[in-house]
Amino acid sequence: MATALLIIDFQNDFTPGGALPVADGDAIAGPVQRLADALDVVAATRDWHPADHSSFEPYGGPWPVHCVRDTHGAEFHPAMAEIEIDAVISKGVDRDDPGYSGFAGTELAGLLRNRDAEDVFVVGLATEYCVRVSAIDAVREELEVTLVEDGTRGLEVHKGDVARAIEEMRAAGARVAQSADVLAAVGR
Ligand code: VGL
Ligand code: ZN
């Protein structure tokens, strides 16, 4: 059985200076890089929206325009350049698909299965949206799922959203750990 790091949407628009910034979103860089070095397979999702995506405010959605495909905002955060990524999964590609889950309508589950990666560590942005939904879908795919808490940050639109999301992931069957403990456990 192999280990995998699933990096959710560590993109310019979700980090300070971006269109939908997560406060401190860039602070996950260290844990994400250390985990990427230590785990067997690295898969990274990216929010990859058309310019008229239904989640955008001008089209009736809740969010400012963000992560429009092939724009600077949709590019991975510069810290990702240090990481050897085995697979990139684009999501939210269709106008009417919210694209919160890295698993819905993508090849991600099959890819992890092909690599025998059943032990999946989840990091990225934002904790209570794409990280939450992806981690819960990973449990549904019968993977062993660990949320690495210091490898994720949230938007916290409402106070307590991040804490509630973490409890929801735990209740669904995900473990919650800190990167130092994961690194110690895998012996690197
Ligand atoms: C996300 C809001 C809108 C995320 C994506 O990556 O968590 N959040 N699109
Ligand atoms: Zn989005």
Image (cartoon, helix red, strand yellow):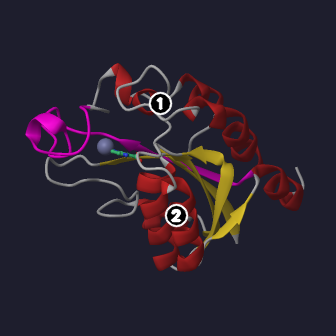
Tell me the residue at 83%/50% (across/down): 180
Magenta-highlighted residues:
39-65
Q: What's the amino acid at mark 1?
A: Phe
Asked whether residue 78 appears in the rendered view, the answer is yes
Q: Give the main secondary structure of the magenta stretch.
A: loop
Cα separation between marks 2 and 1: 27 Å
Indicate which disc residue 76 carries.
1
Name the residue tied to disc 2. 164
Tell me the residue at 51%/51% (across/down): 127
Q: What's the amino acid at mark 2?
A: Arg
In the rendered image, residue 89, in percent from the top left (x then y), is placed at 40, 48
Instruction: Find numbered disc 2 in the image and state the secondary structure of the residue it sits on.
Output: helix
Q: Nearer the viewer, residue 174 or 49?
A: 174
In the rendered image, residue 65, in percent from the top left (x then y), is placed at 24, 31
Left or right for 184, reference 146: right
Instruction: Find numbered disc 1 in the image and state the secondary structure of the residue it sits on.
Output: loop
Left or right for 90, reference 40: left
